[in-house]
Image (cartoon, rainbow, N blue to C red):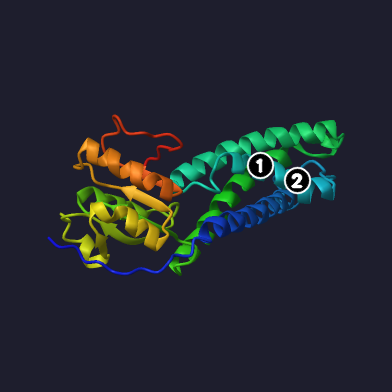
Amino acid sequence: MKCKKIKTNKLDNTVSYTMPLLLLCVDYLAILSAQKVAIYLRQEMEFLSVYHFMSNIPNLYFYFLVPVVFIAFLYNSHIYVNRMPFWEVIQKIFYAVILSMLVCITMMYFGHIAGGVSRLYVALSGITSFAFLCIFRYIVKKALFRFNMLLEPVLIIGAGKTAELVVRQFSNDTGFGAKIIGFIDDAPISNELPRQYTVLGNFSESETIIKETGVKTVIIAAPGLGKYKLLELVNKIQPLVKDLSFVPDLIGVPVGNMELQKLY
């Protein structure tokens, strides 16, 4: 089968820098909102306000130190730079919130302000922070991806059943935010994919296509590709991209500076 070739324009890869900054701002607003809601619940809800409570948290802690601690742990979990299933994002947020709360409690204790902070408020703050971080992030990503904004251009090598599963996963999960620009395959097995996307060329043209499109995220979804052909392909394209994922036999393939990520 002769693959259809098209001339592609250089893609705008500023998404790699814009998305982390946007999510950082969203997380900051989520943390502030969570603290405000925790204070409101502690002060105003009748069944929670049996004991008198005054919020004695200085503005330095409330608007700067506490959010910085949260964002530092969130950043360390790589959810700003790595694309992953949303359930895994939720898991990482959960652990980041727990660690952040422990650090914040310790920081307030040594800052001699812990005496004016209710333990119930601390618990409410942790719960609302986790909930707001998940909800804010989901809503913002869903809205942006719905309008085709801030999507990461992705090139998929392989156009068979495995590629169909990858495309389906991208469509169903908010965490990835992938914009598939096309496929590379010598003889696409899938009848579905060529109708939805463009086949840009064959395996031997991978290096040229990646250079022409400027794409920085490539997924190799060709389990039937021989080990030596896969090795040759990886050696050619790995220096050209930022993220390289694949789903074949990994024996003998160099995986330095690569990270394994589940797509299902």
Looking at the picture, how far across and down is residue 20, in whole percent? 57, 54
Q: In terms of image quadrants, where is residue 231?
A: top left
Amino acid carrying mark 1 in the image: Ala
**Mark before the other along the chain sequence, 1 or 2:** 2
Q: Nearer the viewer, residue 239 or 155?
A: 239
Q: Is residue 120 above or below residue 173?
A: above
Under tag 1, what secondary structure?
helix
Specify the quadrant that holds the C terminus: top left
Asked if the residue at tag 2 contacts the one at tag 1, i.e. Cβ–Cβ closer than 8 Å, the answer is no
Which residue is rendered at x = 28% and y = 58% of the image? 183
Q: Which residue is mark 1?
A: 72
Q: Image check: 218 left or right of 111?
A: left
Residue at coordinates 63% horizontally, 39% vertically from top-left?
A: 73
Q: Tell me: 205 left or right of 56.
A: left
On the image, the x and y values in percent for residue 62 come to: 78, 48
Q: Which residue is mark 2?
A: 49
Residue 117 place in picture, x, y as percent: 80, 39
252 in relation to 244, above or below = above
Tag 2, which secondary structure? loop
Residue shown at 43%/38% (left/top)? 258
* Structural crowding at the residue carrying mark 1, measured as other residues with C-alpha within 10 Å and reported as few (<14), some (14–19) or many (≥20): few
